[in-house]
Amino acid sequence: MTTQQEIPVSAVIAIQVENESGALARVIGLFSGRGYNIESLTVAPVDETRHQSRINIVTTATPRVLEQIRAQVERLVPVYRVSVMTKQDAHVAREMALVKVIASGERRADALRIAQAFRAHPVDASATSFVFELTGATDKLDAFIDLMRPLGLAEVSRTGIVAIARGAAIL
Amino acid sequence: MNAAPHQTDLKPHTPGTDTSVVQTGAEVLLRVLSEQGVEVIFGYPGGAVLPIYDAIFRQNAIRHVLVRHEQAAVHAAEAYARSTGKVGVVLVTSGPGATNTVTGLLDAMLDSIPVVCFSGQVGVPLIGTDAFQEADTTGITRPATKYNYLIRRADEIAPSVHEAFHIARSGRPGPVLVDLPKNLMVGPAPYTAPPRAPHPSYQPQTEPGREAIARAVAAMKGARKPLFYTGGGVINAGPEASVALRRLVEKTGFPCTSTLMGLGAMPSDDRRFLGMLGMHGTYEANMATHDCDVLIALGSRFDDRVTGRLDAFSPGSFKIHADIDPSQINKIVRVDVGVVGDVRRVIEMMLEEWDCTPANPRQPIDLAQWWHQIGEWRGLDSLGFTQDMTPGAIIRPQYAIRRLHELATATGRDTYVSTEVGQHQMWAAQHFGFDRPNRWLTSGGLGTMGYGLPAAVGAQIAHPDALVIDIAGEASILMNIQELSTIAQYRLPVKVFILNNQYMGMVRQWQELLHESRYSESYSAALPDFVKLAESFHGRGLRATCVDELDGVITEMLAHPGPVVADICVAQEENCYPMIPSGAPHNQMLLGPGQDDEISAEGRMLV
């Protein structure tokens, strides 16, 4: 066993499943039952004609455990395919956030300025508040939310990561 | 899944749909069961399954066996499946009926036994309302089954039930549950033939890759100290797999050890068979596992009862692991060659490959030294014991099992042995020689006390003329003792052989070894009189209290045409040896009493 096998790394597990009742419960039940960590989770139908959904789970585990996760998830009856994407596997990972800021005067102007720099769009505005929509890598969202904190950050809603491999490779 | 549409909203006619007679959901269910070759259902009725029981009443193709507790229904179905190679079938009602099956389902899951369990459910409109005897059965059983279904529409009944059997028996076998709302059983339902392409996402790989087989056999050809380590997968792969294994062992001349679940694949008296390995395995099997240079795991899964301390497990060997479940490979132990596929095909392909690969002329396979070493280990006779034969002497449990084996063999009858869980189970595994597959019915992975008696019911229903013995302990047997009533009802000539030491023996043994003999709650107080108990359930009760009574009791038990409970009073503080203490490697076995002071603090933490 090499030491590299024992260093935990962050990974996105992309899972193509049959869009059927209980499929998500089977996957997340497997994670909790076997002691694997879920840091974020997204799920949505991606293929209407073949009734398939895609689940993206972000987890941190050693390469050895990641291999086990892949094998354990793959053997679930409604699972078609599983791919594990770590830093080494070229992939794009994005997240969306809706960020509500309640502010007035100087702070309101500052919030708008920073939003522009982050390419966050105001999707709702009132006399006292904004809702910004922001898409990007997780650290970009984190940075934006940190900057909004002193300016009247009131509420955050995030999707969790969706990811896909770069190039022509498909799941 | 969509909201449930109206239940009478049937699909339009499609080819293969028989609409000549309108059938109820319950009738469609039974029709599918017949087509799947089901002959016996083990079950217990209740409100939610009344329509199914009514349909059972009005037909003769399928036999129903009424158990006395739903857990027992699953264990009986497991033993039926394991002893016949067919799928075991269970039918229970909603709520408590379904929750009582959970232990049995998980037992089948861990030992890879094909079982389909049908549970009643409240009507579709009542689901989610906390109705009487409602339970979230699919939620509760999800981690205890290979797959499960909640049927929500009448047109799902036939395809889902067909598919349930396919999933239960294919790939790595396991339990599948189908939850059936009552209104769908009463209302009309369409029949459909088995789908040609069941669940598209479920495609188990059964054919092993040639390349992996070639690499495995190349390593085997270069071995000087090889060892086969075979498991329950060989039994699950059908009797042909055991035939192939025997040929492979013969052809290669390699020694072979087996897990608890794999017993019977090799004849127990074959000179190449080293007995069981693991915590209570033989000295020669464990030493060979530790010292071998090529370890060939076939349908076994490196369970912690087998490996002992992981970082010291078979440290120098090149490891080959063949299993039908890809998630087992590299799960516990990193292996050098992983082969995914049905183990019968793996063994057959290894045989072919062995014949076409020439032996390395510079390095001819010479196992003489290895066999010499094994012979020395064998010489220790790690299963040996001494029975005091003076009249009135206390019976040692090992001796009781040996005599049971000898006298049962002398009857010449086909013999099936089930067990409960504990010391008696290990002694049965060590001392009752199994020569054929599918004859040994025990709860390996889950270790379910109370398994043996209902398992004996299932085996005897499947094999009415065979000799079926439940080797039990006095504590375990009380966990499903109500099945004596099932045995009485169906006049099953099951023999219950209780090794009665008035302790939960394995608990007591661990308390002795790990907790300085503080026997916390492990004494079997207030035991029933098993002789009278047997008689009250219309069977015969026998008792042996000393060695000179043993043979007489066993002989009478075997000769009696009906059910028997034999209460064998054995040495109370006998421990099961040899033993790899928790946290120790294979080459540090305890061979007998007096070596017990070396269990590490780490070992105490392990189960």
Image (cartoon, grey):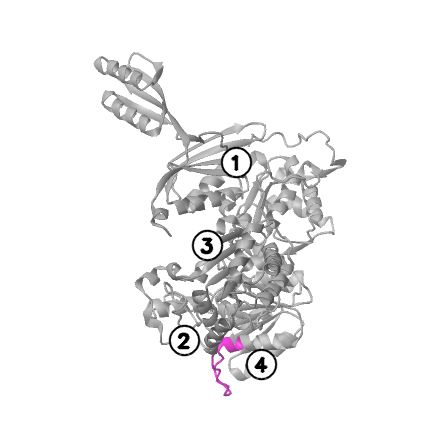
- Look at the numbered disc 3 and give the secondary structure of its residue: loop
Q: Would you place residue B147 above or below residue A159 in this image? A: below
Within 10 angstroms of label 2, few (less than 14), some, or many (20 or more) residues? Answer: some
Compare marks 3 and 2 and give the one earlier in the sequence: 3
Q: Which residue is mark 2?
A: B592
Whole-angstrom CA distance, mark 4 to mark 1, is: 60 Å
Is residue B100 visible in the rendered image? The answer is no
Q: Identify which residue is drawn at 56% across, 54% down.
A: B213
Kind of residue sitting beneath label 1: Val
Query: Horizontally, is B279 left or right of B51 in the view?
Result: left
The chain identifier of the residue carrying mark 3 reads B
Q: Would you place residue A171 above or below residue B427 in this image? A: above
- Look at the numbered disc 2 and give the secondary structure of its residue: loop
- Look at the numbered disc 1 and give the secondary structure of its residue: strand
Q: Which residue is mark 1?
A: A17
Q: Which residue is mark 3?
A: B335
Query: Horizontally, is A95 left or right of B460 in the view?
Result: left
Whole-angstrom CA distance, mark 3 to mark 1, is: 29 Å
